[in-house]
Amino acid sequence: MTMTTKVLSVSVPVADQDLALKFYTEVLGCELRTDVEVWPGARMIEVVPPGSNVSLVLLPPDSPIPVAIRLGTPDAQQAHNKIREAGVTLHNEELVRMEGIPAMFSFTDPDGNGLVYLEDTDENEPR
């Protein structure tokens, strides 16, 4: 199995999400893709440069949403098992499943960088 199918998004730590949104859309010309409160206190803002499939997720450093690189994988459970077997630091003991969002889990690379795998299938378009 090919573990990683694509880069979906990259988090950018920002001090103020509203100011960052204004900068990325009005100055840099990115398009707003998502601005939603995922759960109380967890606002996710996603912008994308025109013509790009890779988005930028604007998150405060203390966000409960992981500041990470989000990657697609064809089978999140199989990827979770392989990551666990490799002894990688997992942040989710089981897959995270939320309505309307692909199955996912987060982990850390050997240098401490945050990574998230989202299941990438024909039935969904993960962000």
Image (spheres, rainbow, N blue to C red):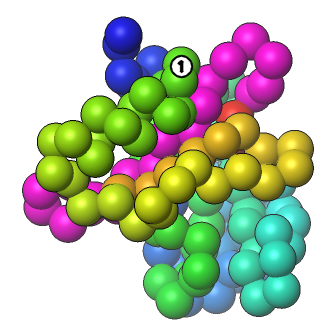
**Taking 14 as reference, is 16 left or right?**
right
- Quadrant location, the C terminus: top right
Label 1 SS: loop
For image coordinates 28% across by 42% down, the residue present is: 83
Residue 7 location, x and y as percent?
46, 32
- Quadrant location, the N terminus: top left
Magenta stretch prevailing secondary structure: loop
Indicate whether 30 appears above or below 51. Answer: below
Quarter residue 123 falls in: top right
Q: Is residue 17 visible?
A: yes
Residue 122 location, x and y as percent?
74, 12
Amino acid on which the number 1 mark rests in the picture: Pro
Indicate whether 95 appears above or below 66. Answer: above
Name the residue tied to disc 1.
74
Residue 95 location, x and y as percent?
57, 50
For image coordinates 20% across by 66% down, the residue present is: 112
For image coordinates 73% across by 64% down, the residue present is: 45
Indicate whether 35 appears above or below 19. Answer: above
